[in-house]
Amino acid sequence: MLSAEIIAVGSELLTPTKADTNSLWLTEKLNEIGIEVKLKTVVGDDEARLEETIKDALRRSDVVISTGGLGPTEDDVTRQVSARAVGKELIFREDVLAEISERFRQIKREMPEINKRQAFVIDSAEVLSNPNGSAPGMLFETDGKFFVVLPGPPRELKPMFENYILPKLREKAGEIFVKRKIIRVAGMGESAVDEAIAPIYLQYQNPQTTILFNRSEIEIHLAAQAETESEADRLLEEVAEKIADRLGIAVFTISDQTMEQVIGNLLTEENKTLSIAESCTGGLISERITEVAGASRYFIEGVIAYANEAKIRALNVPKELIEAHGAVSGEVAEAMAKGVRERAKTDFGISVTGVAGPGGGTAEKPVGLVFIGFSNAAETKSIKMNLPGDRYLIRWRASQAALDFLRRKMLKNLTTE
């Protein structure tokens, strides 16, 4: 398998406000044709460090792709540094200048004198036309290796890579298909998942299995390589099916869907409706549900009842219940779920009440204590959870747990009907 490195150029990428998203997209495209990305590097507008990075990358990798630093200003250093790194001169190309000038004519603007710098390219490199911007890309081949220099803006980089580079790399990599599948798991920890499925995935070198934990769920990533697309798909399905059978209801998707998409599909298929009452999550569950297109078919109403007075007024939670058990309790969670269901006249109601922190916790009710309520015509139930993390994570994990509680209740009802 060919190896690749990606070098993202630009001092702005070293600040906390700007992320390198190009490398994620490039990695996906390279993986699809069987090229493995071994290293990603972010380098500021520092000529010495960039030259060293390019030289090192070309020594150890088959494909090196740099992104950014091809603008017309003084701090755009990628052109001259790339040329030095491969032992070549920059040459001025009149035909490249003519293309850049034409771009400006098309948008009815006069080309600034400074943009002529972009007509300097590495001697003997293939120039990659840029119909979406002024900076041409370059492809330089040396000792059987590919050095690709791309502009930074995604609207320029992506078509340039797909039109000029991807076909050449596919030919170089040979006929190999790499397919991926993500299995998402809720209600289990990373260690528990690994313990359950290790006897399955350790039997296979292909597909490769990686277990990841994000803020509220476990992701099981499968990657299969094969000479045909259908064979790669078959390998994935074989392992995914065994893992899903082993983990049971904890698996909420093998199709890389979000929890809110899964909930939306279940509600749509069963022609059911949902309402939500939220306290500590402050509308997060409703926001997630409405992120899915078409949610208006099944999501009727959301109530953010943060204060006790709001719970009493908007959800008909008895004042005596709050006084007896406290707002953060199973009894109040159940009353909230039932109250919102009856208010909105929906098939299902779910609720969340808890202590998100960082303050407000007590010995009896610490930060992270959350109660989730569920109500339908047949029953009203609640579950108690102690969620780790800061305020952001507790709120997010509570939203995920609430949706997962609803999912499990819906699936249980379907199997008993």
Image: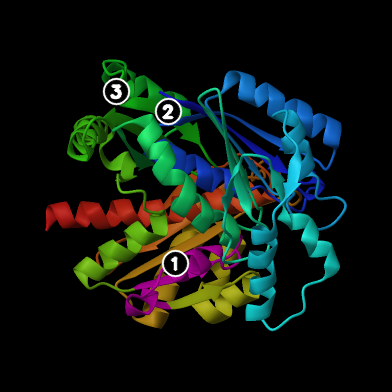
- Residue 220 found in image quarter: top left
* Left or right: residue 91 compared with residue 400: right
Q: Earlier in the sequence, mark 1 or mark 2?
A: 2
Point out which mark residue 206 bears.
Answer: 3
Q: Earlier in the sequence, mark 3 or mark 1?
A: 3
Point out which mark residue 210 bears.
Answer: 2
Camera-side mark, 3 or 2: 3
Camera-side mark, 3 or 1: 3
- Give amino acid for label 3: Asn
> Mark 2: which secondary structure?
strand
- The structure residue drawn at horizontal position 51% and vertical position 59%, both measured from the top left corner, is 352
- Give amino acid for label 1: Ile
Q: Which residues are magenta?
A: 274-300
Q: Residues within 10 Å of mark 3 (few under 14, many from 20)?
A: some
Camera-side mark, 1 or 2: 2
- Give amino acid for label 2: Thr
